[in-house]
Image: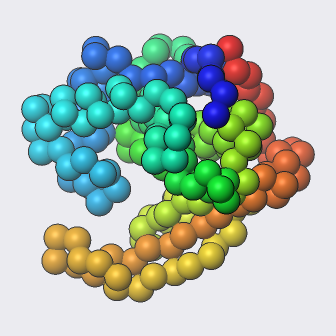
Amino acid sequence: MSSLTLPIETERLVLRTFERGDVESLSAYHSLPSMQRYVFTKTRDKRDVAGALSILRHHVSLQRPGDTLTLAMVRRGDHALIGHVSLHWSDATAGQGEIRFLINPTFAGQGFTREAVSAMFDLAFDHFHIHRVSARSDGRNHHSIKLMQELGMRLEAHYREHALFQGEWDEEMQFAILDREWQRSTKVQDFPFRHRVA
């Protein structure tokens, strides 16, 4: 896949790779008990967060299937790191990718995740030429489910009681969108921001 020039700027965010100095800001949301259901690297203390940050700092490009690009969501006004968004390249032959995102609950509900995910969709489809992008959500995470629906993603599967998490049955919902579907959805006027690749 072709190289990418970073950072990416949207209306209110700068999307950049993670840096060593991000450990405190990452810890503010990544280590929250409510976030542990959604993270791939469990974090209980600062040492765990430092380990997670080290992994995220290496998610800088998509060169081969299995690679992940992770970008920190940094608010333009005050440079606060408020979350991150990732694109995982899962299959080259079929052009498959997966989007993942996590935001500090303090900044949730303000449209930042939608802004970051939309920019990542543009990267996936326009820059990396991925054909289909999927996303997963806990069945109880109504905000994420609503976001994916608003972005034009289609519900493709709903797995009931498919895993145990801290003694409770987990439900997973899987959404997806095709490159041609995203091209249509970006014409909708509900997207009040513009973004550019720097």
Question: 107 above or below 72?
Answer: below
Instruction: Pick whichever, 90 or 160, lies toward us.
Output: 90
Q: Which residue is at a point 22% across and 71% down the rendered structure image?
A: 165
Q: Is residue 102 above or below residue 52?
A: below
Quick one: quadrant of the C terminus? top right
Q: Position of residue 186 (x, y in %)?
A: 83, 45
Relative depth, front residue between 79 and 84: 84
Please name whichever residue, 165 or 141, is drawn nearer the observer in this view of the structure. Answer: 165
Q: Is residue 36 left or right of residue 121?
A: left
Looking at the image, what colour scheme do you see?
rainbow
Q: Is residue 18 toward the left or the right of residue 90 in the image? A: left
Find residue 155 and report its horizontal and vertical position in percent: 63, 73
Q: Quadrant of the N terminus?
A: top right
Whole-percent x, y for residue 38 in the image = 34, 56
Identify the residue at image location x=35%, y=32%: 56
**Residue 18 visible (yes or no):** yes
Residue 184 point in image, percent of width and height: 88, 52
On screen, residue 48 versus residue 160, left or right, reads left
| Drawn side of residue 144 relative to residue 49, left or right | right
Residue 159 against residue 100 in the figure, above or below: below
Q: How many marks?
A: 0
| Depth check, front residue: 33 or 178 | 178
Give the image quarter of residue 105.
Answer: top left
The quadrant holding residue 115 is top right
Task: Say above or below: 106 vs 181.
Answer: above
**Residue depicted at x 25% and y 47%:** 41
What residue do we see at 89% from left, 45% from top? 187
